[in-house]
Image: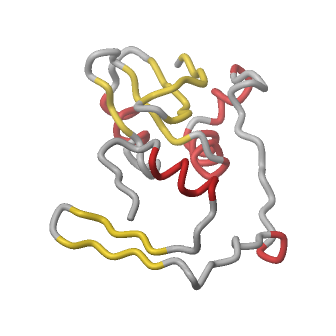
Amino acid sequence: MKVAKSNYMGRERIGLQFTYDKEIVKLIKQIKYATWDNTLKTWYIPFTVEAYESLIKLFPDVAGSISEFTKPAIIKDKEEDKQLPAVKKDVNIEVVGRKIFLSLPKNDDDVRFILSMRYSRWE
């Protein structure tokens, strides 16, 4: 089995190529979000630690052939480290039909940005 990191459908994935075997396909389908690409004849699994660990659990002999580049890094996310941006309460957005109305305090940078969008008007 050939295992390599690749970009599939705009996302980082782990690509799996091998000669067709019903049993291998059955095992790969057990990995969450495993996807088959008929054009490239490749199975793709998410580039996540969970998917990688599932792959190693199902195919222990593959672990030695996987390069460090292909292994996803464990990213520790702490909830307390995350801070949401402050929400401005003086901005109002209203959608009427095909129009979007923005009401916000006047700021020259905001006005220039909004006017840079196609079909925008300032009142």
Q: Residue at the location (39% across, 22% down)?
A: 42
Closest to the observer: 115 or 66? 115
Residue for point 64% across, 27% down: 62
Q: Is residue 43 left or right of residue 77?
A: left
Does residue 21 appear left or right of residue 65 in this picture? Answer: left
Q: Nearer the viewer, residue 62 or 70?
A: 70
Residue name at image x 55 percent, y 48 percent: 112
Q: Position of residue 76 (x, y in %)?
A: 81, 59
| Horizontal side, residue 119 vs residue 108: left or right | left
Instruction: Specify the farthest residue to the bottom.
Output: 89
- Residue 43 vs 113, above or below: the answer is above
Q: From this view, report whether residue 56 is shown above or below residue 39.
A: below
Q: Toward which corner of the image does residue 85 lie, by quadrant? A: bottom right
Instruction: Give how far across and how far down residue 83 sits, in percent.
Output: 76, 72
Q: Looking at the picture, tell me which residue is in the foreground, 56 or 98.
A: 98
Q: Nearer the viewer, residue 1 or 9?
A: 9
Q: Residue at x 54, y 48 (%)?
A: 113
Q: Position of residue 46 (x, y in %)?
A: 52, 42
Assign the C terminus to one quadrant of the image: bottom left
Looking at the image, residue 67 lies above or below residue 32:
above
> Which colour style is shown?
secondary structure
Q: How many marks?
A: 0
Residue 8 at x, y percent in the picture: 44, 28
The residue at the far left in this view is 97
